[in-house]
Image: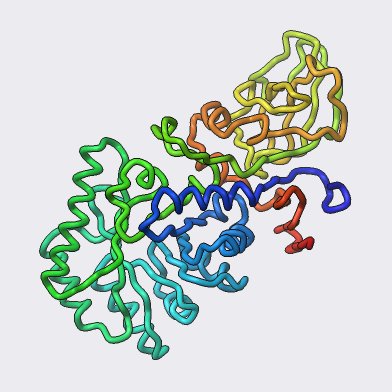
Amino acid sequence: MDELFLKRTWIDIDLDKLTANYRTACELAPDALVTCVIKSNAYGHGAVRIAQALQAAGCMSFAVSCAREALELRKHGVQGEILVMGLTEPVMLESCIRADITLTVASAGEMLDAEKAAARLQKDAHLQLKVDTGFHRLGVACTEEAAAELAKTANALHYARLEGMFSHLGLVTTQRDEMQHDALMQMYAWLKQSGVEIKDVHICDSIGLVRYPQWHHSRVRVGALLFGVRPARSEHMPYKDEETLVFRTTISRIHDVKAGEVVGYGDDMILDYDARIATLCVGYGDGYPRCLSNGHGKVWLHGKLAQVVGLVCMDQMMVDVTDIPEAQVGDTVDLLGGGVPYMDYADWAHTNRNEAISILSRRPVRVYHQGGRVVTVLDSMLEERRDFD
């Protein structure tokens, strides 16, 4: 590994587990299209390389949050459908339409904006309608009046084509989810009555995929499950969903600190014992959260957990290795994944697993493994990528 990249702080990513998780999603939704959601840099994994791996496994449908994420994929040759699930700024419409990117709209006005941009290019625009069924984030209000206005506009379009409609479950209670699903289908019925025929209807994400198979409809949108974030309340189901990354760093210094001393910034944690302290080459600038300071977080080395000491800095942090005498400078330390399961880490940080992996920054090098060997090393800071046959 040393000859492939400079060992400091990096993320090991298992592409075999990723593609296995994708196949699991396909098995769980055999009659629906599986759209792989790779927003937020593919949940910290590196969107382009993840899309390429999924494409090689047979995926031809991706979803992202914004136009720039979609255009990044196209720039690097990713084929198939790319759906922007958030709203697209008017200034980005032509670039997206030119790149055959599917856009989300949530009003008649947004449909008209897409129509005008498509007309200027003399090129079809592919649209999906976002419906607010009670999540109250994005989407057109689910009313008969709104449906009538949308239908009037949709029926007059020449270049923009309303091909699908979707919503997002709040996942609070089954009863509330049922109300949301019923609202989406009511909007579908109103539009159909007004002459708007939509063949693509979807509402399930990773949790909906496993919890509501009766609502898979034409497609499911799978994000977290791809990366080993197993949906809650699915533990009894007989399928595998393996964690796909390990966030790692190295020890840069080990030193003895006397009782009564303070480690790092502030004085929130004064040592009451003589300690052996290791400094790690990682901080919140890399994506290790500051909330895991002062004993809230733990790292894994030599088969043991070491407690975080003092405040996590932007670029460095300290851990107590008093009870790990074999620890030495240069050792590899697991921060997230590997010896530190996603769920434990998320619980310590009082967050969820999605945030834990998605906040990993561009600074750590991404090292991709497949078939038991390193296949790609990606350094986003230096804009360098090395592929190995």
Query: In the image, what residue occupies the spot 43% across and 66% down?
Result: 83
Query: Which quadrant is the C terminus positioned in?
Result: bottom right
Q: Residue at x 80, y 43 (%)?
A: 8
Q: Is residue 88 left or right of residue 133?
A: right
Q: Quadrant of residue 269?
A: top right
The picture quadrant where one finds residue 46 is: bottom right
Q: Position of residue 34 (x, y in %)?
A: 43, 58
Which residue appears at 37% of the width and 79% of the height?
125
Is 112 on the left or on the right of 244, as rendered? Answer: left
Could you tell me residue 18's position as x and y percent? 58, 50
- Asked if 21 appears above or below 356 in the picture, the reply is below
Q: Nearer the viewer, residue 328 or 222?
A: 222
Figure check: 178 above or below 377: above
Examine the rendered structure and indicate whether residue 258 appears above or below residue 97: above
Residue 26's spot in the image, x, y percent?
45, 53
Q: Is residue 55 left or right of residue 95?
A: right
The one of 121 and 163 positioned closer to us in this rendering: 163
Image color mode:
rainbow
Look at the picture and state if 127 lies above or below 286: below
Foreground pick, 21 / 238: 238
What is the total number of numbered labels drawn onto the structure image?
0
